[in-house]
Amino acid sequence: MRTLDIDQLLIENVISAATAPASEISARVADLGPATVAEVALAEVAGRAALHGRPAIEQVGIQFQLAFGSARLDYVVHLGPEKIAIEASSSEDAPVTIKQDLVDLLYETFGPAGNHGATREVAIMETVPAVDPADPVHRRRAAAVTAFRQLLVALSGRRPSLTDLALAFGSDKWGGHWYTPLYERYFEPYSEQQVKVLEIGVGGYRAVDAGGASLRMWKHYFRRGMIYGLDLFDKSGLTEPRLRILQGDQGDQEFLATMAREHGPFDIVIDDGSHFCHHVIASFNALFPHVRPGGMYVVEDLQTSYWPGWGGNVDPTASGTSMSMIKSLLDGLNHQEQMREGGSATLTTERLVTGVHAHHNIVFIDKGLNTEQGAPAWIPRTAEIQRLYDSE
């Protein structure tokens, strides 16, 4: 399927075109190439369709006839219990034919909410009543009706909850942990944005095509997002539209900075990697500068801070652990109030961390400008305040 080979940057440009003013979108589609836009949109719709209800009882091909000006582009989208596939072809005997304006389809897939789909025409095969439900003609029509319904729901813009997505793809963010309600709380403001998300840790260990459950979850939660997964092992077999796999060591700050300059900046970074404390700290130091203002950095599985085998310490007050780093960020939030000797300069993270939201084993860190004024200078900071009270 040629769609899988489309460059990720080109996909980003297609998504950007979908959010452009109506007066510009046709020109952008022409520049990108109508066939490219059609393939990106149909690949996205087909991928979403698999999440909505049971698949058709047998493989079925749905014909799309997409119009762009005077041109017509024909594609067959294959859905069912087997793999999803898209081919640029015309099928004379397709059980369902969908005719639609390409720009309208693009709006439905990646564009803002609105009354889209008005140009869609649907023709479905007709059958006569049959007593035997196993009749192959009726089975084929039933499969077509199911597949068409899946496509319509996919085009509606409705997405499952993060918990449902975690269950659909087998992510341990629900079940192994209970993170998805928290993620939904903090990520909802980003859900309709054209974000870049980096998750450290793909899963599946050494197998090139194993893991990626959470990455697929993020892809379907952020319908306009570009998702990047970073792992120590080669996981290139998991690459798909809007999901790119990178290989490298999360403990190598130089590599991380180079990678982030090439693929970032990121709106969201999630550290679900090795969970070794020195790796968590190294990754944060290297990648937080490459999070956009208004973005968020997340660290999972902070329980390792208390486990010596992971670089943690049984003493909660010990330094050098992941949690000690988080605690220092909390102090840094209030750097304006601290009485520092010699007027020592503030750290970069103190100026750029605007919130730290800690929950059981997971923390969400906001990035922005932490420049709020401190308490008024006339308020006493030393023991003289006690003397004032004592004198009354």
Image (cartoon, grey):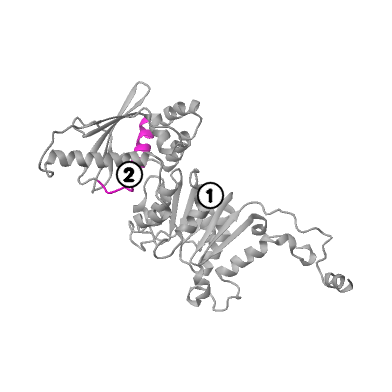
The image's mark for residue 49 is 2
Pick the front one: 321 or 62:
62
Which residue in the rendered view is the most extreme toward the top? Answer: 70
- Secondary structure at numbered mark 2: helix
Q: How far apart are the two marked residues, 2 and 1, measured between alpha carbons? A: 26 Å
- The N terminus - image quarter: top left
Relative image position of residue 88 (x, y in whole percent): 28, 34
The image's mark for residue 292 is none
Q: Which residues are magenta?
A: 33-55
- Residue type of the residue flagged with mark 2: Ala
Q: Is residue 262 visible?
A: no
Residue 114 on the magenta span: no
Relative image position of residue 372 (x, y in whole percent): 71, 53
Relative image position of residue 123 (x, y in whole percent): 25, 30
Closer to the chain start, of discs 2 and 1, is 2
Image depth: mark 2 or mark 1 in front? 2
- The C terminus - image quarter: bottom right
Q: Is residue 296 above or below residue 320?
A: above
Residue on which the image places disc 1: 267
Looking at the rendered structure, the number of numbered marks drawn on it comes to 2
Task: Specify few, some or many for label 1: CA neighbours under 10 Å numbering under 14, 14-19, or 20 or more.
Answer: many
346 horizontally vs 70: left or right: right
Task: Specify few, some or many for label 2: CA neighbours under 10 Å numbering under 14, 14-19, or 20 or more.
Answer: many
- Residue type of the residue flagged with mark 1: Asp
- Kindly indicate the quadrant of the structure image that contains residue 180: bottom left
Q: Is residue 241 visible?
A: yes
